[in-house]
Image: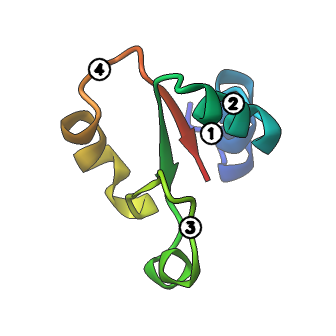
């Protein structure tokens, strides 16, 4: 049985944890190993982004994430 779009979103929310920006900043400032992945549109990236972020537009994640981030245990923060 297939799920509707809203059901898929709810299922993803149950599986993917969130993090407050203050937590991300603490991790970045402490030198903790994490990837900040900016998945916005190119014009949004160009308008401004987190200096440590890697740009990977939403439609390109699946095909490129494993190549860019081969370490499976690395924390990835998407915004």
Under circle 1, the secondary element is: loop
Q: Are marks 4 and 3 in contact (CB under 8 Å)?
A: no
Residue 27, image x, y percentages = 64, 28
Q: Are marks 4 and 1 in contact (CB under 8 Å)?
A: no
Q: Which mark is residue 11?
A: 2
Residue 13, image x, y percentages = 73, 33
Q: CA distance from mark 4 to mark 1?
A: 31 Å
Q: Nearer the viewer, residue 40 or 53?
A: 53
Give neighbour class at mark 3: few <14, some 14-19, many 20+ (Cα, 10 Å).
some
Under circle 3, the secondary element is: loop
Of labels 3 and 2, earlier in sequence is 2
Q: Are marks 1 and 2 in contact (CB under 8 Å)?
A: yes
Give neighbour class at mark 4: few <14, some 14-19, many 20+ (Cα, 10 Å).
few
Give neighbour class at mark 1: few <14, some 14-19, many 20+ (Cα, 10 Å).
few
Q: CA distance from mark 4 to mark 3?
A: 24 Å
Q: CA distance from mark 3 to mark 2?
A: 28 Å
Decide if residue 12 is on the left or right side of residue 41: right
Q: Residue furthest front?
A: 30
Mark closer to the observer (3, 1): 3
Q: Which mark is residue 71?
A: 4
Give neighbour class at mark 2: few <14, some 14-19, many 20+ (Cα, 10 Å).
few
Under circle 2, the secondary element is: helix
Up-down relation of residue 40 to residue 71 (above or below): below
Q: Locate residue 8: give its quadrant.
A: top right
Decide if residue 26 is on the left or right side of residue 28: right
Of labels 4 and 3, earlier in sequence is 3
Instruction: Please give the residue where the numbered disc 1 appears in the rendered image.
Output: 3
Of labels 1 and 2, earlier in sequence is 1
Q: What residue is drawn where x is 66% and y is 47%?
A: 4
Instruction: Please give the residue where the numbered disc 3 appears in the rendered image.
Output: 49
Of labels 4 and 2, earlier in sequence is 2
């Amino acid at each position: 049985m297939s799920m509707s779009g809203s059901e898929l979103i709810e299922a993803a929310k149950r599986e993917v944890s969130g993090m407050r920006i203050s937590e991300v900043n603490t991790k970045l400032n402490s030198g903790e190993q994490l990837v900040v992945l900016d998945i916005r549109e190119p014009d949004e990236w160009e308008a401004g982004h987190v200096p440590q972020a890697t740009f990977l537009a939403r439609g390109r994640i699946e095909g490129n994430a494993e190549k860019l981030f081969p370490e499976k245990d690395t924390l990835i923060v998407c915004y």
